[in-house]
Every structure is written in structure tokens, then in C-alpha cells.
Amino acid sequence: MQIHFDDSPGELQIDGKSYKLKQLHWHTPSEHTIDGQQYPLELHMVHQADDGSFTVAAILYEDGDEDKFLKKIKDELEELAKEAQVPLKKLEYKMLKKSPHSYYRYTGSLTAPPCSENVIWSVLADARTVSKEQVKALTEPLAEGYRKNARPVQPLNGRKVELYKDE
């Protein structure tokens, strides 16, 4: 399940470099773990710089209350069960832009082909909540074999993961 943007609704600044939001997609279950815990859902916000390099901001979701962003696209998710592509109405992305209090950062690769290397990952340290019904709405339009679409958790292979915290 992906949302592609013709015109980027926002950007991310890392070390003075600007990355434009290109697409959002979800994985079930999560591709990242924190202290060994895997989550039922993970959102990837894929950004690209003018030089072609990528950064991905990831949000982990635990079972709980509805996610406000998914609630806003509920009708489109239901329509996707019938159609391969559905245009989205104009959305407000403020709820995705909240500045995190803490996040993990490391350099890795994209988790889907072409699996490009040297991608800067920022994984929010605090999970948000999503209802089981919303997870079902994201996976239901997919064929049975694609409903669990997470790459298996990968070994660190010497990668350094740093925790950034607002004090």
C-alpha cells in the first residue's frame, strides 16, 4: 500500500541537506524492532534529495486507538479493495510532521528493490497507536500472500545505531 506524491507535501532537513517527501508506504508487521519487540505496523516516509540520495523516516505502530492519518483516508482504503489505484483527496499531513522527542538513526538500505544503499534511516523511538481494524483496512486490498509484507529483521552487520533525544 503506497501513496505517491506528484508534488511533495513536505521535506526533511538532515545535516543541511533537503530531502523531499516522495511517497509513504506501510509494512505489516514492522521491519524494525526496539529492544527485540516487533510491532504490527510500520510506516515509511521516503524522501529524496536533488542528488538522488534517500532518507526514510519510520514510524512504528502498536495496537491501540485509531491513527488519525489513517482515519482520514478510510474511504480511499475501502475503495482500494475494488480498484488498483485510487486518487486521494487533498489531505493535511500535519499529523505526520510532528517533531519526535527521540529517534534512532543509522545508515542502511531501502528495504524493497532496488534496495539502494547509504540510506539515512530515522526511526521514531515512541510508537504511535493504530487500531486492528485500520491494519486490516491496509492489508485487505492485497492478495493473501502479500498481506505480511515486511522484510525480515536484518542483522546490524557493524552498523552504528544512535539514539537522539530532546532533553
Image: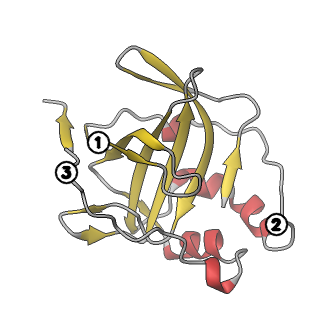
Residue 58, relative to residue 50: is it above or below? below
User: Would you name the residue on which mark 2 appears?
Assistant: 79
Label 2 element class: helix
Give percent across and percent down for residue 163: 18, 41
The three-letter code of the residue at mark 3 reads: Gly
Give percent across and percent down for residue 61: 40, 61
Left or right, 155 with respect to 74, comes to left
- Quadrant showing the N terminus: bottom right
Label 1 element class: strand
Say which residue appears at 19% left-offset and 51% top-offset: 158
The three-letter code of the residue at mark 1 reads: Tyr
Q: CA distance from mark 1 to mark 3?
A: 11 Å
Of tags 2 and 3, the one toward the viewer is: 3
- Quadrant showing the C terminus: top left
Left or right, 145 with respect to 58, comes to right
How dense is the environment of label 2, judged by Cα within 10 Å: few (below 14), some, or many (20 and up)? Answer: some
Say which residue appears at 57% left-offset and 50% top-offset: 69
How dense is the environment of label 3, judged by Cα within 10 Å: few (below 14), some, or many (20 and up)? Answer: few
User: Would you name the residue on which mark 1 appears?
Assistant: 106
How dense is the environment of label 1, judged by Cα within 10 Å: few (below 14), some, or many (20 and up)? Answer: some
Q: Quadrant of residue 140?
A: bottom right
Residue 42, relative to residue 51: is it above or below? below
Q: Quadrant of residue 17?
A: top left
In the displayed orientation, state which residue is furthest to the bottom. 144
Q: Nearer the viewer, residue 44 or 159?
A: 159
Of tags 1 and 2, the one toward the viewer is: 1
Say which residue appears at 29% left-offset and 42% top-offset: 106
